[in-house]
Image (cartoon, rainbow, N blue to C red):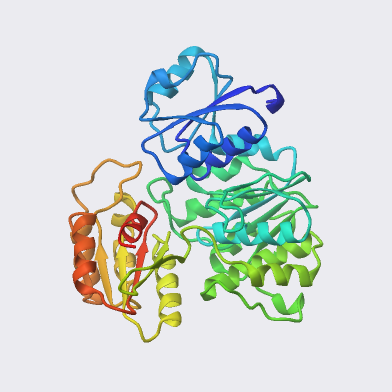
């Protein structure tokens, strides 16, 4: 596909964090952009201000007949009226990940993958590359603090991209440098088990040639199988001692961010960025949207933070970081379970993840792409949490939670909203 021939693009699910980055890219190139999403958001409003025409709700009439290309998120159903119309009209359609593959084919590509930490690692690497004057193009699954965007449109041949494993999407990429932060069981609505996930990562690793690199922790038992037949060079990101004389001092909290920074630094070394420039950039990195993000302080001097964590490992890591940072303060976590399938399959692991918080307020499950499952709900999860830590309570809606927070918090308490859905709205509404 020659992107220079594209004059009009329509995006189905244009408010998605990944899809919207490609929409921004096309807008920056002067392409006419339209799109649809379920509801207005911070992202869609920004796109509209840049010139995109956005429809709320999915209807066939949203799609003009003279569109050259339709880009869609894999979260939509195949009977989506805009997708059906595109097929009927013979308009070329591409998934978000297919478009990433097409865009990246003209670049030297660094793909950052892994169950946890890929967004932050991508953002760290973006800052290192920008400050290292490499002028990269970057697509990341969050909003960068420096630019407020999920896209950096650079002018060099370097492309840094967050690579998601869901539905094997990352196999549309052929990276020159592949980062694997870690591998765990996740997306079990699609993958059968951990072995199935490892096989997807292995297939990606095996696309790399002798002159390419995989940056990972080769001593991680779950990663060893993935890199066993690698033809490329394997770089151990955990071995910072062999590459630097200083220790990493970060503004962002948590041991997990130390690991993310080490991975970013290892890539910086491959890209021949000066070590001191890389260290300085990492030390100045202030995080990304929805990753232990400080939202503000209420009139009662209660600080509110928000995090995207929804997998047990992420939950534990964030809560430990919060406890380490606020050892003498009460921490109230508002947790929004993400997907019925994930909540059901990881129920016990999720339930065992809340020992480092004083109280857990459990919202209804965020369904996203799934239909309601009557066999799992937030009350069942709260009961399981209470078998471990006796600190959970289920609520029927956000309004109940806001009332609870109003009645049961006081000066110097910490409220942490957590989940991959729209739970952040609770914190924003009480500021």
Asked whether the viewer can see residue 48, the reply is: yes
Q: Quadrant of residue 412?
A: bottom left
Which residue is painted at 34% across and 55% down in the image?
425
Q: Residue furthest front?
A: 299
**Residue 227 in the figure: left or right of residue 347:** right
Which residue is painted at 43% across and 67% down in the image?
313
Residue in the foreground of this view, choosing between 304 and 82? 304
**Residue 303 in the figure: left or right of residue 279:** left
As displayed, is residue 89 above or below residue 308? above
**Residue 227 in the figure: left or right of residue 52:** right
- Percent of width and height locating residue 61: 40, 18
Quadrant housing the N terminus: top right
Q: Quadrant of residue 57?
A: top left
Residue in the foreground of this view, choosing between 295 and 17? 295
- Percent of width and height locating residue 35: 48, 29
Quadrant housing the C terminus: bottom left
Which residue is painted at 45% across and 35% down in the image?
13
As displayed, is residue 70 above or below residue 394? above
Residue in the foreground of this view, choosing between 372 and 220? 372
As displayed, is residue 367 above or below residue 60? below
- Percent of width and height locating residue 177: 71, 54
As displayed, is residue 146 above or below residue 372? below
- Percent of width and height locating residue 86: 48, 19
């Amino acid at each position: 596909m020659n992107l220079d021939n594209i004059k009009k693009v329509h995006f189905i699910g244009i408010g998605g964090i990944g899809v919207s980055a490609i929409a921004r890219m096309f807008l920056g190139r002067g392409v006419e952009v339209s799109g649809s999403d379920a509801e207005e958001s911070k992202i869609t409003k920004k796109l509209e201000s840049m010139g995109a025409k956005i429809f709320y709700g999915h209807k066939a009439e949203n799609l003009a007949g003279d569109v050259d290309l339709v880009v869609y998120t894999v979260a939509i159903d195949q009977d989506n009226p805009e997708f059906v119309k595109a097929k009927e009209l013979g308009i070329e359609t591409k998934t978000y990940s297919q478009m990433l593959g097409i865009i990246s084919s003209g670049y030297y590509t660094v793909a950052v993958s892994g169950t946890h930490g890929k967004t932050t690692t991508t953002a760290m690497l973006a800052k290192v590359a920008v400050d290292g004057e490499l002028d990269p193009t970057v697509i990341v699954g969050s909003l960068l603090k420096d630019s407020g965007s999920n896209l950096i449109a650079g002018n060099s041949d370097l492309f840094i991209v967050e690579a998601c494993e869901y539905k094997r999407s990352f196999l549309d990429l052929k990276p020159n440098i592949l980062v694997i932060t870690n591998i765990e069981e996740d997306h079990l609505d699609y993958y059968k088990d951990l072995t199935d996930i490892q096989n997807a990562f292995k297939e990606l690793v095996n696309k790399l040639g002798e002159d390419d690199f995989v940056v990972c922790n080769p001593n991680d038992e779950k990663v060893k199988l993935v890199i066993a037949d690698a033809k490329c060079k394997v770089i151990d990101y955990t071995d910072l001692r062999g590459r630097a004389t200083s220790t990493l001092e970060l503004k962002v909290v948590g041991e997990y961010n130390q690991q993310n920074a080490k991975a970013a630094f290892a890539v910086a070394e491959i890209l021949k960025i000066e070590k001191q420039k890389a260290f300085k950039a990492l030390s100045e990195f202030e995080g990304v949207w929805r990753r232990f993000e400080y939202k503000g302080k209420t009139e009662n001097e209660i600080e509110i933070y928000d995090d995207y964590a929804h997998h047990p490992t992420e939950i534990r890591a964030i809560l430990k970081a919060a406890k380490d940072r606020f050892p003498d303060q009460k921490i109230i976590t508002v947790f929004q379970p993400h997907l019925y399938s994930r909540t059901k399959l990881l129920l016990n692991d999720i339930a065992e993840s809340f020992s480092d918080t004083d109280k857990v307020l459990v919202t209804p499950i965020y369904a996203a792409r799934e239909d309601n499952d009557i066999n799992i709900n937030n009350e069942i999860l709260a009961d399981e949490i209470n078998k471990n830590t006796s600190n959970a309570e289920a609520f029927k809606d956000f309004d109940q939670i806001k009332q609870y927070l109003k009645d049961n918090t006081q000066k110097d308490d910490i409220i942490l909203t957590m989940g991959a859905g729209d739970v952040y709205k609770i914190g924003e509404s009480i500021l």
